[in-house]
Amino acid sequence: MLHLQLETDPRWVDIVESNIEEILTDHAWCEQKAATNAITIITHNSQYPDLVTDLLELAKEELEHFQMVHEIIKARGYTLGRERKDSYVNELYKFMNKGGNHLQSMVDRLLFSAMIEARSCERFKLLSQNIKDPELSKFYYDLMVSEAGHYTLFISYARKYGKEIDVDKRWKELVAFEGELIKSYGKSETIHG
């Protein structure tokens, strides 16, 4: 369903388990950034009422996820660390079309967002299936389902409003780029690391 070219090596979960506090902090900030991203898309595309409505719901859900992760952090006696730089997302961002017209920029932002959700979903699935902590296993399963819905939402809107653009071709280009990019990741206790 996600059409990713390269799956994460399951040994990444061993890295995650070596520092649960770090993965939870990184994850919390990923949820905050996802909410901010949805709001940014709304800000630049407010002329689409259906998009605005759906992304407002998505932003609220991402903030709820941020809160849920923060609750787990507090319950375990950890502290939410400082926001982390997400090198994966920054590298992926470089692939986005910065020129062109407004529609091309919107479609690229939606596809960029779909890709991040797809990779997060894939990582959450891996965590849900392999992490030894039962609470986190269930938590990541529930989030995997949510992220799959977000991925679908972004792809659907790219196709809906990008009829003048070959969205499938652009998506394949992004998938190929991400497939090469992800080869450098999976070595740290971060959601995309």
Image: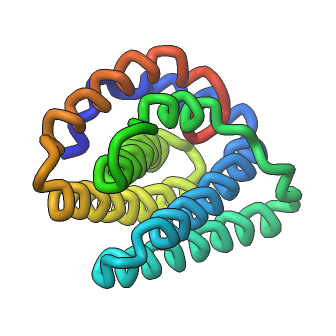
Position of residue 189 relative to residue 140, above or below, is above
Position of residue 8 relative to residue 74, above or below, is above
What residue sits 46% from the left and 64% below the top? 41
Residue 49 lies, in percent from the top left, at: 32, 84
Residue 96 lies, in percent from the top left, at: 42, 36
Colouring: rainbow
Residue 9 lies, in percent from the top left, at: 43, 22
Q: Is residue 71 visible?
A: yes
User: Based on the displayed image, in which of its 4 quarters is residue 177 positioned?
Assistant: top left
Residue 116 lies, in percent from the top left, at: 44, 45
Q: Is residue 122 visible?
A: no
Q: Looking at the rendering, in which quadrant would you find the N terminus?
A: top left
- Position of 190 with respect to 129 (left or right) is right
User: Based on the displayed image, in which of its 4 quarters is residue 88 positioned?
Assistant: top right
Frontmost residue, 104 versus 122: 104
Q: Looking at the rendering, in which quadrant would you find the C terminus?
A: top right
What residue sits 77% from the left and 61% below the top? 73
- Mark count: 0
User: Based on the displayed image, in which of its 4 quarters is residue 102 positioned?
Assistant: bottom left
- Position of 34 with respect to 22 (left or right) is left
What residue sits 69% from the left and 55% below the top? 29
- Position of 188 with respect to 151 (left or right) is right
